[in-house]
Image (cartoon, coloured by chain):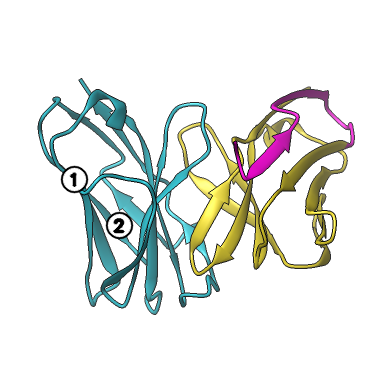
Amino acid sequence: ETGVTQSPTHLIKTRGQQVTLRCSSQSGHNTVSWYQQALGQGPQFIFQYYREEENGRGNFPPRFSGLQFPNYSSELNVNALELDDSALYLCASSLDAGGNGYTFGSGTRLTVV
Amino acid sequence: KNEVEQSPQNLTAQEGEFITINCSYSVGISALHWLQQHPGGGIVSLFMLSSGKKKHGRLIATINIQEKHSSLHITASHPRDSAVYICAVRRGGNQFYFGTGTSLTVIP
């Protein structure tokens, strides 16, 4: 059972398009992280937001961007989609920047054709 | 080179067997998590460890900080335990390094 909800669960986009993925965290969870999991791989850290500010970023290009809102929801935006962007995108939230109460969402499966 | 290495990559067991999945890491960490991922993608956090051992039902997780090694044990395995088990280490905040996972299949 998870308190983190992601939408949509599945999505198909065309190369070059833009996509927005959404995550709704548990109330009080001030920190949210996004991960990309390619098929057969472990999740890779994209970035982290704490109190609506980005405070950590992995090795992803600027066309991956995010937003965090005061209502504990957040977005991952990807511009100029490439075929290699096809993956499961996971959102995880926690009570604080130290990772307490860490909870994953079930993910959004993005397919780029 | 991965900061987190898991073994084995794939594991098939008969129902009732005792199962061990290993995780080694090469960086300093603040905590280690064992995660379970079922087909369809959803990830569930099983354990968070910073030292010693934790037990939850048939699952036991241990960590040796000096040796940078952790193990996940499943006693009396059951087909519903079939999933991918992922070891993830946290260096600070929410930045995790993940292993590539161990795919477990338990046969009735």
Is disc 1 surrounded by few (<14), some (14 to 19) or many (20+) residues within 10 Å? Answer: few
In three-dimensional space, the C-alpha distance between marks 2 and 1, rounded to whole angstroms, equals 19 Å
- Quickly name the residue at label 1: A63
- Using residue B39 as the reference point, say whether residue B32 is left or right of it: right
Local SS, label 1: loop
| Chain of the residue where label 2 is placed in the rendered structure | A
> Chain B appears in which tint?
yellow
B58 vs A65, nearest the viewer: A65
Residue B23 drawn in magenta: no
Local SS, label 2: strand
Q: Which residue type carries mark 1?
A: Arg
A46 vs A59, nearest the viewer: A59
- Using residue B32 as the reference point, say whether residue A66 is left or right of it: left
- Count of marks placed on residues: 2
Q: Which mark is residue A23?
A: 2
For the point 37% across and 47% down, the residue is: A59
B89 vs A96, nearest the viewer: B89
The answer to whether A100 is drawn above or below residue B18 in the figure is: below
Q: Which image quarter is the N terminus of chain B in?
A: top right
Q: Which residues are magenta?
A: B1-18
User: Residue A15 location in percent, x, y?
Assistant: 14, 25
Q: Which chain is cyan?
A: A
Quarter of the view holding residue B16: top right
Q: Which image quarter is the C terminus of chain B in?
A: top right
User: Residue B83 location in percent, x, y?
Assistant: 63, 34
User: Residue A53 location in percent, x, y?
Assistant: 27, 73
The answer to whether A17 is drawn above or below residue A24 in the figure is: above
| Chain of the residue where label 1 is placed in the rendered structure | A
